[in-house]
Amino acid sequence: MGENAVRFENVRKAFGKQVILDHISCDVEKGKTTVIVGPSGTGKSVFLKLLVGLLKPDHGSIYVDGQDVTRLSQNDLFEVRKKFGMLFQDGALFDSQNVGDNIAFPLRRHTRKSHKEIMKIVAQKLDQVGLPGIEHKLPSELSGGMRKRVGLARAMALDPEIILFDEPNSGLDPVMSDAIDKLIIKTKQMTGSTFIVISHDIPGTFQIADHIIMLYKSKVIATGTCDEIKASTNPVLQQFFSRNSEIPIDPGYATGELDLRPYVTGELKDNEDS
């Protein structure tokens, strides 16, 4: 196991009586691609918001390169956020600005580089995502896949240590979804950054992931490599990754009474007594 870029320790987050993350602990290894999966409503997006300090946990610590972001001042948190790039679900481009200005935005905001230097970086990032020479196009002139690629170019503009992907395949057809997965792999090899991907796309998950974290009912119920996750006999994992909509044999899955203790993080082996 290598050095961790991110560590969650006993993190709890609730909104009123609704518990979103229930004392979860997990690690994200530096320089690897970690994919966070789970049914809708299990706290995947809240995980990202906690990580970048947009939300505060009710309990626990969140470390980014050894710094507990839950205890930083606003100024220090702002500096930590510079370590992150973010690709949003729909690209989240500024519709009134052309592609070049969208990618240049973080460079103008956070650096003192000249216009010439910035536009050189913009051209480099567009080339890296396979869209050279489209600086003057508006977002409305781009397809969904192209918008995602431009969003990734903007996420890479400051050469961040960690890039966050929120459902990068959302809204794309299977062919374009596969193209985005291949782009993620290529970008990862090119940059060496740490990637954290929120995804519902099962084929894509196994294509891009070095490590998988599975959230279910506010808990981390499994972590492991692709091979470890595939080999798990955890009924929740088996149902999720087989895309089986039928109710599992254990009725507790449907009622919320399924005992998840045999399947918590670090216990991927079968529980012979269960």
Image (cartoon, grey):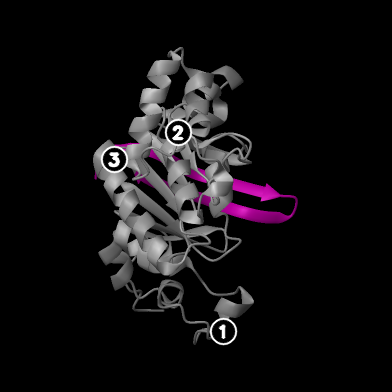
Q: Are marks 1 and 2 in contact (CB under 8 Å)?
A: no
The percent position of residue 15, horizontal first and vertical second, equals 71, 49
Disc 3 packing (10 Å; few <14; some 14–19; many ≥20): many
The percent position of residue 57, horizontal first and vertical second, equals 60, 40
Residue 237, image quadrant? bottom left
Q: Which residue is mark 1?
A: 251
Is residue 19 shown left or right of residue 35? Answer: right
Q: What's the CA distance linking mark 3 and mark 2?
A: 13 Å
Amino acid type at mark 1: Pro
Magenta segment range? 1-28
- Quarter of the image with the C terminus is bottom left
Task: Give the number of the mark in front: 1 or 3.
Answer: 3
Amino acid type at mark 3: Gly
Q: Relative to residue 239, is residue 113 depicted above or below?
A: above
The disc, 1 or 3, on the residue closer to the chain's N-terminal end is 3
Q: What's the CA distance linking mark 1 and mark 3?
A: 40 Å
- Quarter of the image with the N terminus is top left
Is residue 223 shown left or right of residue 38? Answer: left
The percent position of residue 37, horizontal first and vertical second, equals 46, 60
Q: Which residue is mark 3?
A: 31
Q: Which residue is mark 2?
A: 84
- Going 36% across and 68% down the picture, which residue do you hit? 203
Answer whether residue 6 is magenta in the image. yes
